[in-house]
Amino acid sequence: MTTYFYKFPVTPQVFYKTKYTYALVNLKPIVPGHVLVVPFRRVARLKQLNAKESTDFIATVQLINEFIEKVYKADASNIAMQDGIAAGQSVPHVHCHIIPRYLKDGYGDHIYDLLEKHEADLNGFFQQVCRGRIVAADMDRHPRSMEEMEKEAKWLQGELEKFVKAREGEKEEEEGKKEGEGKKEGEGKKE
Amino acid sequence: MTTYFYKFPVTPQVFYKTKYTYALVNLKPIVPGHVLVVPFRRVARLKQLNAKESTDFIATVQLINEFIEKVYKADASNIAMQDGIAAGQSVPHVHCHIIPRYLKDGYGDHIYDLLEKHEADLNGFFQQVCRGRIVAADMDRHPRSMEEMEKEAKWLQGELEKFVKAREGEKEEEEGKKEGEGKKEGEGKKE
């Protein structure tokens, strides 16, 4: 089934899906690992998500944020939504930017200028794609090829599966330890 | 009960509380209506919120965002989290900025420069408050008095109560209409 970002098919860029939400790699990431989290239902504003959708959306942002920081060895993240045109939103479909940051990346607050330019580029890109061809909106960051994005999406998908499995393993181990401690406590009481 | 933002008491600034989350007015809002949404539990990173907390957090962001846009007659909002020091986080307690925006506010992407400066100011402010006095970190935006913030928080609290009541009324009306339509359909079938 084709995944749409607004009216544009983005299936090869998607690396994670839940019932209500998906995550995709960028055409022109500001930094490596800059990804988007998007609800499947095409609404423009955050307030339009129903309770199930917004709960799933934030859980997905949490998961993808933690995963991206780990896989890109980042120190922190900017998590940002341009909610409406007047806030710089270029594609009228709710989306959250996750941008990995480093203590020494040197971007400082300039990262947000780049984010605004990114939104403008997205808009330009999709307008061009709509007319059946891709044209670079600026000369600084060339749009990546579909092959490159698909390759990254597949790599992230594999890494994410490992990440989720490892986390589940850790949880089970923790629960096992708790049970063990519970038994020990129980044993202690018997003595 | 005192509400804390990191280790700083902010009770007079709070205008909304749920079980897990609260919303507060700013010492130095970038624009009127710039508020913060914060989970009660003091953790630094978004990933540390458990499922109940993050679900309540996003529901609160949705509500406060919609409310602030309505009460400040805004067109859109920037919703932003600096998740970690390397992303510009100044207070190590998860917080989400909601910044009302206007089609003609003239800020453009400069809004994010202001946001970064705001985080730096917050940090400076709280460090000063910690030493028992408030000192303006810059001459452009003077910190507001506690009285002014308390007055705004009380006003927002009252407006929010009205907003929530009106929304509940609208929902009931919609449900009433649906029931009415259901009856009509039922009647139609009988004929």
Image (cartoon, coloured by chain):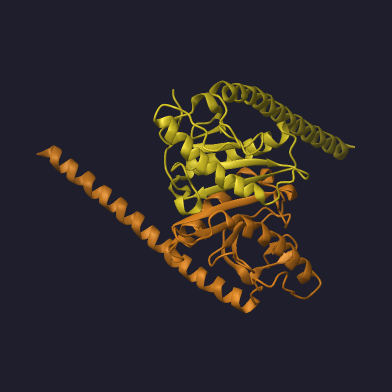
Chain colours: A yellow, B orange
Measured as percent of width and height from the top left, residue B140 is found at 65, 71
Q: Is residue A147 above or below residue A69?
A: above
Q: Is residue A174 above or below residue B178?
A: above
- Drawn side of residue B128 relative to residue B77, left or right: right
Q: Is residue B156 above or below residue A178?
A: below
Q: Could you tell me which residue is drawn at 43 percent across and 64 percent down?
A: B73
Q: Is residue B19 among the parts visible in the rendering?
A: no
Q: Residue furthest right?
A: A191
Q: Is residue B161 among the parts visible in the rendering?
A: yes
- Drawn side of residue A75 relative to residue B17, left or right: right
- Drawn side of residue B96 relative to residue A86, left or right: right
Q: Quadrant of the N terminus of chain A?
A: top left
Which of the pair A110/A14 is nearer the observer?
A110
- Quadrant assignment, res B115: bottom right
Which of the pair A125/A71 is nearer the observer?
A125
Q: Quadrant of the C terminus of chain A?
A: top right
Which of the pair B187/A15 is nearer the observer?
A15
- Quadrant assignment, res B147: bottom right
Q: Is residue A145 above or below residue B99?
A: above
Measured as percent of width and height from the top left, residue A66 is found at 68, 38
Q: Could you tell me which residue is drawn at 53 percent across and 55 percent down?
A: B108
Q: Could you tell me which residue is drawn at 45 percent across and 66 percent down?
A: B71
